[in-house]
Amino acid sequence: MLIGHKVIMKDEVPSTNQLAKALAAEGEVEGTVVVASTQTAGRGRLGRSWTSPPGGIYLSVILRPPMDATLLNRLTVFSCLPVALAIEDVYGIQAGIKWPNDIIAGGLKVGGILAEGSSMAGRTESVVLGIGINLNTRPEDVGLATATSLLALTGKEVARDAFLHTLLFRLDAFYASLLKGELDTDAYRSRCQTLGRVVEARLGDQMVAGKAIYIEDGGALVIKTEEGMTYSLSSAYDTTLREEAAQEYFRQ
Ligand code: BTN
């Protein structure tokens, strides 16, 4: 097992991604995982912060994949698949995915992933995959109206280390498939709740709205505008899901 051969447990850190990146820069080997009970400066995608109260699980995995742009895109987008699968294993519920990598349960966000690359002399040397999941988080600590915790949703409190064990197993299998070029991208598509919905994406200073019609094998989201234009969005774009269903938006 590559991912999780070494696990560093911390009570409180500013951010497990920050710590894992520092360790990676010092030469820490691939597969090492940093786990914390709480974070004081948890980071989210697109420069947002990630509230990290006790009860959640916050971890970062140090990876040193071949530095191929297609593979890195696939890694960042599809990495939420093993997280969804671990939730399904442990809780016996269907987990959804909001593209690129929000984990959804009961229609609300229960987790997210932040992949960060570290460069040395302009060359990416390692990738830190940061995962935050609202596991046993008390509902009043979740903080966002659009989010919930698995405890709030299922009433089931799970041992964090048992969950971690399942998650590391799933992540390890995912990473091995990714490297072998055998990723089951359909397993992602079937859980992806963004497909068929209307999304808005910021492209530079322009907002583009369209129906999400496909996820490419490389991880890009393809949207089609009312005028019939298609755009292939990389995970770097800030996309928001429109409230109304696609059928209503594209009424004839
Ligand atoms: C998002 O949905 O915006 C991504 C959230 C990622 C949060 C995790 S928690 C562990 C790791 N350390 C961080 O500072 N962030 C990630």
Image (cartoon, rainbow, N blue to C red):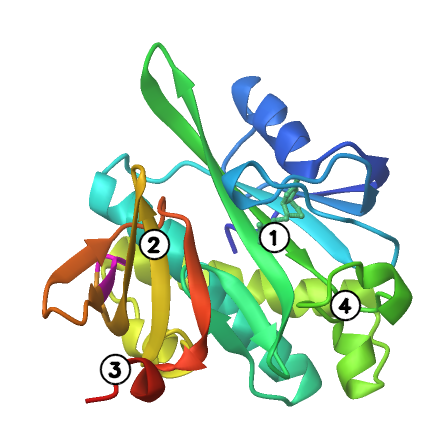
Q: Which residue is mark 2?
A: 201
- First in sequence: mark 1 vs mark 2: 1
Label 1: which residue? 131
Q: Residues within 10 Å of mark 2 (few under 14, many from 20)?
A: some
Amino acid type at circle 1 is Ile
Numbered range of the magenta stretch: 218-222
Tag 3 and tag 4, C-beta contact below 8 Å: no
Numbered mark located on residue 135 in the image: 4
Tag of residue 250: 3
181 over 70 or under it: above or below:
below
- Position of the C terminus by quadrant: bottom left
User: Height in image: 73 above or below 243?
Assistant: above
- Res 216 visible: no
Secondary structure found at label 2: strand
Mark 1 CB lies closer than 8 A to ligand 1: yes
Image height of 8 relative to 18, above or below:
below
* Alpha carbon distance from label 3 to label 1: 35 Å
Q: Position of residue 19 (x, y in %)?
A: 67, 29
Q: Secondary structure at mark 3?
A: loop
Residue occupying the point 61% across, 52% down: 131
C-alpha separation, residue under disc 3 versus residue under disc 2? 17 Å
